[in-house]
Amino acid sequence: MNDSEVMKLLRDLVNDQYLAVLATRNPDGLHGSLVAFAASPDLRELVFVTNRATRKYANLQEDCRVVLVMDNRHNEMRDFTEAAAVTVYGGAEEVTGPGREELERRFIAKHAHLNQFATAPSCAVFRVRVQRYSLVRRFQEVTDVVIEP
């Protein structure tokens, strides 16, 4: 695949998927959570929302490093030759004040059904500044895309 084909597949994957697995870390080890997310148009940032009373929120207060994984599988045999997955590496930060509203709008544009959740005072909005995408196709074709700051 050439660079433009890789970026198209990456953009399609990130924009078409509604959920990702978020991995966070705590002193006892790693923790995985399913999160709804949205991406910025340039793919440099992802946004997700979580209640402050969650394990992932507590973990992010201690260690901002995150990994998110999303894929386009259908749980069918064709996935072995057609499915693609992307691992996103980055750092997450809670956004408050005027910046929160912009990220809320981006999130709600993709997840209108989560409007009340996203705007609740008990919820935190996180921005993930993407450092790298690792795209895997056909279970063995790996392409890394580094996002320059």
Image (cartoon, rainbow, N blue to C red):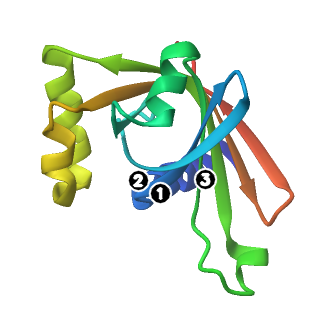
Does dot 3 land on a helix, a strand or a loop? helix
10 Å neighbourhood of mark 1: few (<14), some, or many (≥20)? few
Contact between marks 2 and 3 (CB within 8 A): the answer is: no
The mark that comes first in sequence, 2 or 3, is 3
Does dot 1 land on a helix, a strand or a loop? helix
Q: Amino acid at mark 3?
A: Glu
Tell us which disc is closer to us: 2 or 3: 2
User: What residue is disc 2 on?
Assistant: 15
Q: Amino acid at mark 1?
A: Asp
- The numbered disc on residue 28 is none
Q: In the displayed structure, would residue 147 be above or below residue 81?
A: above
Left or right relative to 11: residue 85: right
Q: Amino acid at mark 2?
A: Asn
Mark 3–mark 1 Cα distance, whole angstroms, equals 10 Å
Quadrant location of residue 32?
top right
Contact between marks 2 and 1 (CB within 8 A): the answer is: yes
Left or right relative to 138: residue 126: left
Along the line of sight, the residue nearer the viewer: 27 or 144: 27
Tell us which disc is closer to us: 3 or 1: 1
User: What residue is disc 1 on?
Assistant: 12
Q: Residue at x 36, y 27 (%)?
A: 126
Mark 2–mark 1 Cα distance, whole angstroms, equals 5 Å
Along the line of sight, the residue nearer the viewer: 137 or 30: 30
Does dot 2 land on a helix, a strand or a loop? helix
Q: What is the x, y in percent for residue 1?
A: 72, 54
